[in-house]
Amino acid sequence: MSTSPDLTGARWIKSSFSGNGGAQCVEWAPDVASASGMVPVRDSKAPDGPALIFEAAAWSSFVAFAKTRDV
């Protein structure tokens, strides 16, 4: 039995923090996240490639940490 959410037909949203030049494009699937509690994240330059799946709490912790870093 798989614990990963089904990403077939998922609606992907580009992160507002992705670079405008297209070199740093991260997407996530908010509908899947709200339905499953798991946050799928992928590289928008490789939409047919793999997605990383995070538990919502772990993803929230990562985002909070990333916001404290200088880019």
Image (cartoon, rainbow, N blue to C red):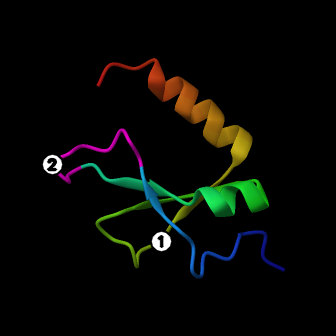
Q: Is residue 58 above or below residue 40?
A: above
Q: Residue at x 71, y 45 (%)?
A: 56
Mark 1 crowd level (few <14, some 14–19, many ≥20, 10 Å Cα): few
Q: Which mark is residue 14?
A: none
Label 1: which secondary element: loop
Q: Is residue 34 above or below residue 47?
A: above
Q: Quadrant of the C terminus?
A: top left
Question: Which picture quadrant has residue 29?
Answer: bottom right
Horizontal and vertical percent for residue 22?
20, 54
Q: Residue at x 40, y 79 (%)?
A: 48
Tell me the CA gap for discs 1 and 2. 22 Å
Amino acid bearing label 2: Gly
Mark 2 crowd level (few <14, some 14–19, many ≥20, 10 Å Cα): few
Q: Which residues are magenta?
A: 15-23
Q: Residue at x 78, y 69 (%)?
A: 3
Q: In this image, 61 relative to 13: left or right?
A: right
Horizontal and vertical percent for residue 30?
60, 56
Earlier in the chain: of badge 1 and badge 2, it is 2
Q: Quadrant of the N terminus?
A: bottom right
Q: In this image, 62 relative to 55: left or right?
A: left
Q: Main secondary structure of the magenta part?
A: loop
Q: In this image, 22 relative to 35: left or right?
A: left
Amino acid bearing label 1: Pro
Q: In this image, 11 relative to 45: left or right?
A: right
Q: Residue placed farthest to the left in the image?
A: 21
Q: Is residue 28 above or below residue 11?
A: above
Horizontal and vertical percent for residue 9?
57, 80
Label 2: which secondary element: loop
Label 1, on which residue? 50
Label 2, on which residue? 21
Q: Are marks 1 and 2 in contact (CB under 8 Å)?
A: no
Horizontal and vertical percent for residue 12?
48, 64
